[in-house]
Amino acid sequence: MNAPIRNENLQLLNGNHAVAWGVRLASPDVAPLYPITPQTPILEKLIDFKSADLLGTEILTPESEHSAMAAAVAASATGARVFSATSSQGLLLMHELLHYAAGSRLPIVLFNVNRTPAAPWGFWPDQIDSLSQRDTGWVQLYSETPQESLDTVIQAFRIAEASELPVMVNHDAFYVSHAVEPVSVPDQGAVELYLPKVDRSMWLDTDIGRAIGAPIGQDGWNRTRREMDAAMQTIVGLTKDAGKAWGEMSGRPYAPLELYRCDDAEVVFVTMGSMAGTAREAVDRLRESGVAAGLVKVRLFRPMPMADLHAALADIPCALVLDRNYSPGVGGVLHQELMAGFYGAENAPRIFGFLTGVGGTNVPVEMLEKLAVDYRQAKQNNNPIWVE
Amino acid sequence: MKDIEYNEAGQFCSGHNACAGCAEALSMRVILNAVGKNTVGVVVPSCVAIIVGAHPRSSAKIPFIHGLLESAAAMASGVKRGLVSQGKDDTTVLCLAGDGGTYDIGLQALSSAAERNEDILYVCFDNEGYMNTGGQTSSSTPLAASTGSSPLGKTTRKKNLVEILAAHRIPYIATASPSHLSDLSEKVTKAKAIRGMKVIIVVIPCLPGWGIADDAAVKVSRLAVESGVFPLIEVEDGLRYSINSADKTKPIDEYLDLQKRYRHISDSERVELQQDVDDSWDRLVARTKM
Amino acid sequence: MNSQPSTLWTHLSSETNHTGTWRSALPLYQNQPSPCHGACPVGGSIATWIKQVKDGDHYEAWLTLVDNNPFPAIAGRICHHPCETACNRAEHDETVGICSLERFVGDLALREGWSFPSPDVELSQSVAVIGGGPAGLSAAYQLRRQGLQVTLFEAREALGGLMRYGIPSYRLSPDILDGEVARITAMGIDLRLNAEVMDEKALTALHKDFDAVFLATGASLPKELPGLDYSQSFVLDSAAFLADEPEAQSSQTGEHILVIGGGSAALDVARTARRLGRKVTVLTLESEGHLPAQQVELDEASEEGIEFITGAMMQSAVGKDGSVTVHATKVDFQIGNAPGGFTAAPVAGSEFTIEVNTIIPAIGQDADLARWNGILNTSGPVINISGAHGKTSQPGIFAGGDVASMSRFVTQAIGMGKEAALGIVATLVDDADVVAPSQEPEVLLDRINTAYHVNHGRNTQGLAEVASRLETFDEVQQPLAPAQAQSEAERCFSCGTCTLCDNCFYYCPDVAIIKLEDGYEIKTDYCKGCGLCVAECPTGSIHMQEDIAS
């Protein structure tokens, strides 16, 4: 459908600048932004583009992330395409608005750079900031690389606008946000074809004085959640369509899950974000050493593509979930999601949950190799396991 | 006889859920008609959100977004930018909030929007407390007034929002009263024509919150103006103050005596309150001469 | 797309919510009488005609005025204006100058030559009106308006009665009187001048010839002061003095005149005498502050150099060589409990004398009732009448004015003439359209929202300079200028009379009032019954009535 990109432009970009490029190509109408380490380069790059007249977006820089998301919500309600970016404390400050945006069915795209929340203060890669927003009604996607971040932020608009649900795309602080790699930047015209402007079903229309968000009775509120549920049911399919179409255009297809060397695997790592890169390396080394290892990279965390996970792990006896996050009193969030998703399933793999790299600690390839070796035949253990 | 008149174009509808005799609904009527059809509204939790209406109804002919309490000015900014980004530069953005949402929880966002000089018209319905939650103290509650959270009377003064906003040097700040509807209408019309941030603070005597009769809101607000408790003023560019009501002509007694929230005050407190009003008036007059 | 029902977006107007069910009371628009109307001897629609003046509809205002009184120019000059005493505005700043406004309209009508319309129908019923003073003329006018045939009998050679023969021209110019009387006679009245109805026989004859008779012969017999010999040449009858031409007045009076009495007639005598160049002293039984004359008359008299001795009583007068020694004493004047009652006991040791040349007692006049003996019942000094319409004991004979009342006010007589005419019409004409007076309570100050009435002192009429006043008999009080009249009309609260100011419309928080061409309508589906419209009504012409049915 979409014309292939003729002149892909290869640039050395860090993850945040790659995001800014993706945003520039998606041409949102409005972008409220507030600086926070390590998100700030996204803001700065967008303002650079704007200052150089390369971006038509209305950028506003209010006094807080709370107001940034409030402005995003309001701008989106006018029918505008809206982008914002944040990290950690900023995302947590937005929390109230995240519920609001989803409840209002506003297709905002938010880029979050995963960072440890205080206290104590820290600036390190950890996904608990966004994972703790999983109940707000936002679609969540996790990116492993600068290229994927650029590609995903554009796909996110397509998913959001098709479902009228907000989409949050995440990548890890520094490991992705500040890591530089050659990034293929697609052609503007091709992206416009991929992401046409679409009219929303409803907006703040002066011709028809309708109000959004007005107080509602119990039945009405209940109905809004049923409608959100129905919308969430479409997300896996929309994500697949978006990833497939992107692939046809760019040669880089995406799916809710990325499976790496899972065929005939006896043990697979299941993880999200930059950890996937380390796990991929470990898989290769394990395969070389005769262990049939594989990797399931979860790109779409909300809604969890559970049917795809069931299919991916159908013949795999052992899954090692690597969580760079810690939900106190529970363990790793992805681990819990998988445990819940496979509860009662026939031929479910044994699932182990490892708290790896919480707070941004280094996770060497060897550590993962050892986990695979140690656990591929271990007995099921539901408890989270801290990895030194 | 003094005439009142304002444009009535049917922009505010009957059947809303304000209390009988509510001056906020009355002010809404004036404001919505003055601001006109090509307007998008933002309203945050407060009585005014109730007046705009619960789903599936709206009392306004313009669209509204029911925003978050602390986000009134931020959401209004977002609406404006959203409209501008789509070429609708001429659409007015009207933001309606209470004093809790303005003086307290919304002050940060308000200050930010003011500092950015966002092109919005922000109206604060100032009923001097959290009246929609049953009547608790806000930073707009005046000295000595009793509320559910200051039953013995508030021990500190009302925050001076006009001066705070003036310090931001926004193009237009005004105060208004439901007793002076023509003035209110003219101020809205004037503000609408100004580019940048405009704030109008409307005094709203709350019938249950202030403890006044169903038919007395206009009378009480008129006394607030005439006693100098709530002078009608304009401030342009944060510098040029002008008083647009007649001089302070009455002592505060009649104003106080019509309200239950001042029923407990002693004679000496009454004298102090009068002194405070007199001093504030003198300072205001001095500002108009600067 | 953007118009479908939605869970998130509102799609109905609040108008689908009928808040009228909340209410327990509903505003009712109802014009109610103003205090001035209640006090007005002719029952004038004062709030209405002042509103018409305010709106610049002067002709309409005049039509409203003459519904009740064919003499606005006269009443505007000499009425004792109880309307102004009753005016709600007194507590706000000063009463509205109703008389001066009435004069303004009355004078304008004379200048413009506005005339009364002919009656819609000519009826055959005939009425004899006996007496061409204010009561008789008022009755004749009202009867003609209804189409009845009127024959007016006047004992003197000209119409006007007391207005012509008792009120000096510096208070009421003869041109004004002539103009307003001519307008009545132009309606087609069979005039019989110099035709005194002498006795009960003559009255009986008229009673037979006419379908009804209205008797308004006034009060022509002077009350006599005990201790004064009226046969003395230095004693003059006040009524005769006032009725005379200045030359005659001059030739009968000495240099210093003592006028006895504290009412309007006494002051008229005194001020007339001053204009003849005389020194004038007024002796009154009433103490200061209790004189029956209007304050404005007293003020003007003092300005004109008239001396007052109040709270005093003449005991005897002894004439010698053109001068008179008057022996008098101070009295302890006390207001009694009954209306008009008082006591005045001489104060021992306070006797004094004054030397004057002429004494003119002016302590009032009585009606000549002896003439009607045997045909009409009397009650003390007046003919007995019952009800508002002046019915006497003899069916078909009605009475009004000073012959039937002790109030002695011109406008009271005009009002009685009007009421008797209405009574006659009701008696003689089947399905006559006689409007009963409103039984609604008067609108008092508590129902007026004075916030809409800017404080503004009364626009007062100018007065001629004192020096020039004493040289002529020209009118003392000068008319309001048009701008003053406009300003004065705007001071009227219009108590109980809707002025279509739209306050109710604009102040309704529920947008529940609809403006109509000539009023307002409540949208009962939405009115919550808050009463703001009533509270903010500047005229008190709305009130809340219980409404629990909804």
Image (spheres, rainbow, N blue to C red):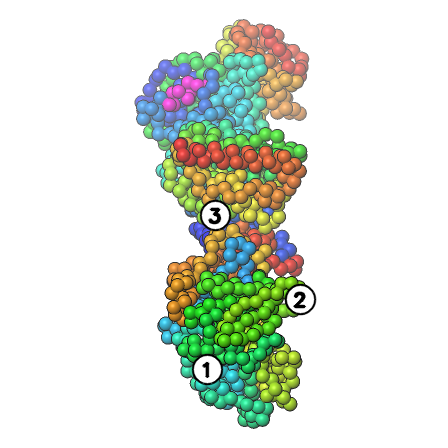
Q: Is mark 3 on a helix, strand or loop?
A: helix
- In the figure, C346 relative to A327: above or below? below
Q: Which is more toward the observer, A382 or C297?
A: C297
Which callout, 1 or 2, points at the residue further toward the start of the chain?
Answer: 1
Q: Are marks 2 and 3 in contact (CB under 8 Å)?
A: no
In the image, residue C245 sits, relative to residue B149, either above or below, namely below
Q: How far apart are marks 1 and 2 (CA)?
A: 42 Å
Chief SS of the magenta region: helix
Q: Give the range drawn in magenta.
A: A39-47
Of badges 3 and 1, the one in the foreground is 1
What kind of residue is marked 2? Ala
Report the residue marked by disc 1: C159
Badge 1 and badge 2 in a common chain:
yes
**Secondary structure category for the residue under label 1:** loop
Q: Which amino acid does the dot numbered 3 rest on?
A: Leu
Residue of label 3: B181
Amino acid type of the residue tagged 1 in the rendering: Leu
Q: Which residue is drawn at 52% across and 19% down?
A: A88
Task: Please state which of the two labelled residues, at mark 1 or mark 2, is closer to the viewer.
Answer: 2
Cα separation between marks 3 and 1: 57 Å
Left or right of residue B259, residue A234 in this image? left
The residue under the point 62% across, 76% down is: C226
